[in-house]
Amino acid sequence: MDLIVEGKVYINGLFQNCCIGIKNGRISAIKKILKGDCHIDYKNKLILPSGIDVHVHFRDPGQIQKEDFSTGSKAALFGGISCVFDMPNTVPQTINLKNLTEKISIGEKKAFTDFGIYAGITNNNIDMIEDLSKKCCGFKIYLGSTTNSLKFDKKNLRTALKNISQTDKPVLFHAEDEEKLVKSSIMENNLVDHLKSRPSVCEETSINDILVESKGLGIKAHICHISSIEGLEALKKRTNNITCGVTPHHCLLSIEKNMGSSTFYKVNPPIRSSFDKESLFTAAKNGLVDVIESDHAPHTKEEKGVEFNEAPSGLPGVETTFPIMLFLAKKEVISFQRVISLLCERPAELLNIPKGRLDVGSDADFIVVDLKDDCKIKSENLHSKCGWTPFEDWSAIFPTHVFVRGEKLIEENEIQVSQGFGKFVGA
């Protein structure tokens, strides 16, 4: 074995004092006692799977003043995330083999974490799905307009899903109905106007369309960033092959709270009422939501500091998602079992990667956590290029050590490897 790590290890839903043996980047043994030349004992610190963020926007290429693969993946790593999946609405959009290949190459040169890339589906590339599937990790369909989104007419949805069903890749959805978005559009001067312009019926309608058009195809589908009670209700009719995710900002923030400079909380779908927020968090706690995803969508302070109607939608979160949830688990607001399921196990299952669990044969991706080591989130301590967070001064527990494929990447707040360590996890 190359390395043995000892501590309170999360195995089969429980923390147990034992050792993890690592060889060639994978877990080779888990036992009470293991012997080896290189042995690290973390005593009573927790050892748990590192997180997987199925939904980030690293803006690379095309908008690297906001973020790039280097800064975005570094932020992910410091937040306990070992693998990220980047969305296709970059500049240029990731909608053909050329752009997909170029983005993978960028990630391979810059990423600290392992990573995957989605291909976007538009009205014009439905016939390219089989070819795209040979390189991408999954597909993304935008059923409603959002930041630099890819235009897609829902009349093409059944055809696109049939083509995707012939591949082994999942499809993820931005579920807001374009027709209803257009009908409800108003001049936006504040967060309340933004909420009115993107009402929950947009989400509910879109989810119902997805459920109808995917029926009988057996595809693995994931509905991103559920934001409303109506969306949750619509999902009660889903089959087992359809998963859903929620973001920290939708399940922890509400429009009734003082949000300071409101453009910084402008996001699609919008932050809604405290009733929606509480329902979403309860659904995550109770297993009705499968995944927590950050929807990390950074914009600079300058870009956000304009008139509300001109400000871009989106906010950062890849570095703060897991630490906030770890603190909430410590406070018994949510169980460690649910946090690990939402951020590690279910994302790995969705993307079919050998991560997310501390099992023999899995990638040796894990974090070390000291529950006594909680802190307040401060923008100046984070690593995203955008330089701000919607969770300023929130309590969190950041990992003390982060391992990816058996390599120690972070130790006591210092990164141990160079950019380009991360590997593409696709085809």
Image: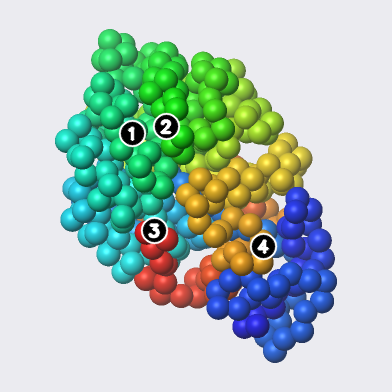
Q: CA distance from mark 3 to mark 2?
A: 23 Å
Report which residue position mark 3 lands on. 426
- Name the residue type under label 3: Gly
Mark 3 residue crowding within 10 angstroms, few (<14) / some (14–19) / many (20+) = some
- Name the residue type under label 2: Leu
Left or right? Give the position of 408 relative to 39.
left
Residue located 71% across and 82% down the image: 39
- Name the residue type under label 4: Asp
Image location of residue 157, percent across then percent down: 30, 27
Which of disc 1 and disc 2 is earlier in sequence? Answer: 1
Q: Secondary structure at mark 4?
A: loop
In the image, residue 330 above or below residue 286: below
- Name the residue type under label 1: Lys
Q: From the viewer's perspective, is the residue at label 3 or at label 2 nearer?
A: 2
Quadrant of the frame with the N terminus: bottom right
Report which residue position mark 1 lands on. 162
In the image, residue 328 above or below residue 373: above
Quadrant of the frame with the C terminus: bottom left
Report which residue position mark 2 lands on. 217
Image location of residue 115, percent across then percent down: 41, 58
* Residue closer to the observer: 10 or 264: 10
Which of disc 2 and disc 4 is earlier in sequence? Answer: 2
Q: Secondary structure at mark 3?
A: loop
Image quadrant where residue 175 sits? top left
Q: CA distance from mark 1 to mark 4?
A: 34 Å
Left or right? Give the position of 63 relative to 294.
left
Q: Are marks 4 and 2 in contact (CB under 8 Å)?
A: no
